[in-house]
Amino acid sequence: MTKFLTKKMKNRMFGLFLFIVFAIALYAVGTAAYASEAGSVTLTLPSIATVAQVSIVLENEQLTYILPSPVTDGNMSVETALANRRSHRNFQNRAISAQQLSQILWAAYGITLPNPHPALRGGLRTTPSAGATFPLEIYAVVGNVEGIEPGVYRYIADGHKIVRVIDRDVRSELAEAALGQRMVREAPASVFFSAVFSRTTGVYGERGRRYVYMEIGHSAQNVYLQAEALGLGTCAIGAFTDNRVRQLLELPAEEEPLYLMPIGYPR
Ligand SMILES: Cc1cc2nc3c(=O)[nH]c(=O)nc-3n(C[C@H](O)[C@H](O)[C@H](O)COP(=O)(O)O)c2cc1C
């Protein structure tokens, strides 16, 4: 049939063909751009609680949970978290998720820049540390966390995991040791902080003690802000009987108990 077409007609048809191809390509690119924009919106929709999985392993015969990876992008600005932060002392009888606990522990002392140097025990963290000596030890006191057995766990930043050190719910006893502060019993979990002062005083002498106190403030504020951003609440607790806490949590002799932060949905 093409032999009946003049050269001019053939050129016109070829031009039309090119136009159609170009129009289809434009439409495809536009659709893809819209789809990726829509995708990023839906990605922010699932709550953190729905995307988490914990892995359970036995390390040196100790129950160990490899925590879900922390997220580094949330739905609340740091300014809003600062403006809204308050100490909460009443909590709902409601579990928090493993992802929320993971996020709180990461905010407290998680690794943000891995480094294999043994002294760093995994790398640089969410919290600044004098001489990168990282004197803090962080524990999760678990009572009602989805997917995690009640007990007391040491947080190991290197590998983002928690290792069980006590295999029962100690919240009531811990509340008694904290001068009867009810919030410790009510909250589904608490973050507990101790410090090995010698890590820092070994470098800075007596002055290192104040550096440890400064560092725990950084870490605790991270927990306040992260809790706020997750729709949770917390309260810094300094009032407890050191020896009772030391015994209850079976702290190693080199660790000094310092701070306690119950975490949960505010009532
Ligand atoms: C070092 C320190 C120790 C604290 N100890 C306790 C405590 O044992 N019990 C308590 O209910 N609140 C305690 N708090 C929380 C303060 O009471 C609270 O931060 C203060 O009332 C200001 O309220 P806000 O945090 O809501 O701004 C402590 C705060 C700090 C900084």
Image: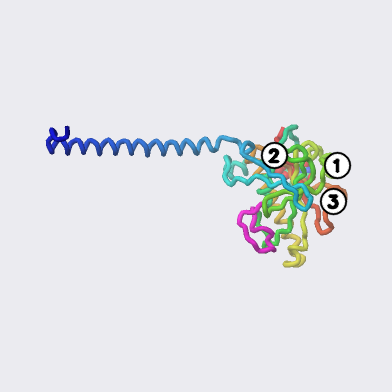
SS at circle 1: helix
Q: How is the image coloured?
A: rainbow
Which numbered disc, 3 or 2, marks the residue that appears first in the sequence? 2
Which quadrant of the render holds ligand 1? Answer: top right
Residue 234: quarter of image:
top right
Measured in 3D between alpha carbons, the distance from the residue under mark 1 to the one under mark 2, in whole angstroms, is: 21 Å
Question: Is the CB of the residue bearing disc 2 within 8 angstroms of ligand 1?
Answer: no
Question: What x and y, as percent, mark residue 243?
Answer: 87, 51
Amino acid type shown at disc 2:
Gly
Q: Which residue is mark 1?
A: 173
Q: Secondary structure at mark 2?
A: strand
- Amino acid identity at mark 1: Glu
Q: Secondary structure at mark 3?
A: loop
The residue wearing badge 2 is 233
Most foreground residue, 88 or 43? 43
- State how far apart marks 3 and 1 are (Cα): 13 Å
Label 2: how many Cα within 10 Å (few below 14, some 14–19, many 20+): many
Name the quadrant of the N terminus. top left
Question: Who's the residue at 75% across and 35% down the image?
Answer: 90
Tell me the CA gap for discs 3 and 2: 27 Å
Which of label 3 and label 1 is nearer to you?
Answer: 3
**Mark 3 vs mark 1: which is more N-terminal?**
1
Disc number for residue 250: 3
Mark 3: which amino acid?
Answer: Glu
Q: Is residue 204 left or right of residue 123?
A: right
* Residue 191 rendering spot, x and y as whole percentages: 74, 46
C-beta proximity under 8 Å, tags 3 and 1: no
Looking at the rendering, which quadrant does residue 206 occupy? bottom right
Q: Quadrant of residue 23?
A: top left
Magenta range is: 110-126
Discs 3, 2 touching: Cβ within 8 Å? no
